[in-house]
Image: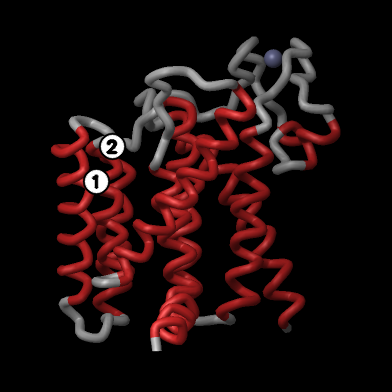
Amino acid sequence: MILFYSVLSFIFGLVLGSFYNVVGLRIPQKIFLSSSRSVCPACNHKLRWFELIPILSYIMQKGKCRHCQRSISPLYPVVEGITAIGFLFSYLHLGLSLDLWITFSLISLFSIVLVADLCFMIIPNSIILCFLPIFMLFRVVQPLEPWWASITGAIAGYSLIALIIVVSRGGMGGGDMKLLGLLGIILGFPSILLAFFMAIVIGLFSSMFLILKNGFKANQKIPFGPAIIAGAIISFLFGDNFMEVYFNLIW
Ligand SMILES: [Zn+2]
């Protein structure tokens, strides 16, 4: 049964990851409902079913469009792979539980925001508004201890980045602020602070990586949204372990 659910989680992640690529690319351009069929962004060639198989199509076409031979962004298979491996790992870590569905939705948010923030430097409000009722429902069905930690968590997350925006005069964006507030509902206070700390660490490492790869550009904007959600996922899955290590060091 474990093998069955592992394979199922992986395939579920692949299919949804492929869908999140489309969501993350189309929502910021406000074309989500206008064209239903997927096309090659370079030549507008309508993609057939065998060109839409997650990861496999990319590998078999060697990363190029069958029609115009221009290269396809590696972001597509990367997002599909991250979502699938993330889903598989969460199932193996959590088993069948409500926490598993919470983690699935956190990974989904991560994949969508990764595409939108990397490609357009934006975290659309509609994405935040779509996940808000889902996260609230999770915390009604399975409240934190105490239940109002969700409310203080949301307020703490939102105000923390609001403060940073005021002090740094725009070092972070309004999207990041709403995102950390949203994640505060799931994580609660004080875990949302751990998530933010993780996000800073992840953000620093990925900007170092980007600078090493592309060279330093003054005023280069670095998308922080994906780092915030990655920090939240780590904090959600391993927060207790971190707290334990931390207190063992202190005492
Ligand atoms: Zn093409």
Q: Nearer the viewer, residue 71 or 168?
A: 168
Q: Earlier in the sequence, mark 1 or mark 2?
A: 2
Q: Residue at x 59, y 17 (%)?
A: 41
Q: Which residue is mark 1?
A: 177
> Can you give x and y, in whole percent of width and height, for residue 182 in the image?
27, 56
Q: Residue at x 46, y 38 (%)?
A: 23
Question: In the displayed structure, does residue 200 sit left or right of residue 104?
Answer: left
Task: Please state which amino acid type lies under the numbered disc 1.
Answer: Met
Choose mark 1 or mark 2, whichever is in front.
2
Q: Quadrant of residue 71?
A: top right
Within 8 Å: ligand 1 and the Cβ of disc 2? no
In the image, what residue type sits under mark 2? Met
Q: Quadrant of residue 92?
A: bottom right
Q: Position of residue 18 (x, y in %)?
A: 60, 43
Residue 106 point in image, percent of width and height: 44, 59
What is the CA distance from the residue labelled 1 to the residue labelled 2?
Answer: 8 Å
- Of helix, strand and loop, which one carries label 1? helix
The quarter of the image holding the N terminus is bottom right
Relative depth, front residue between 16 and 72: 72
Left or right? Give the position of 13 relative to 250: right
Residue 168 in percent (x, y) is at 21, 35
In contact (CB < 8 Å): disc 1 and disc 2: yes
Residue farthest to the bottom? Answer: 251
Disc on res. 172: 2
Residue 26 sits in quarter = top left
Asked if residue 90 is positioned above or below residue 113 in the image, the reply reads below
Q: Is residue 221 visible?
A: yes
| Helix, strand or loop status at disc 2 | loop
Colour scheme shown: secondary structure
Question: Taking the image as four quarters, which one is ligand 1 found in?
Answer: top right
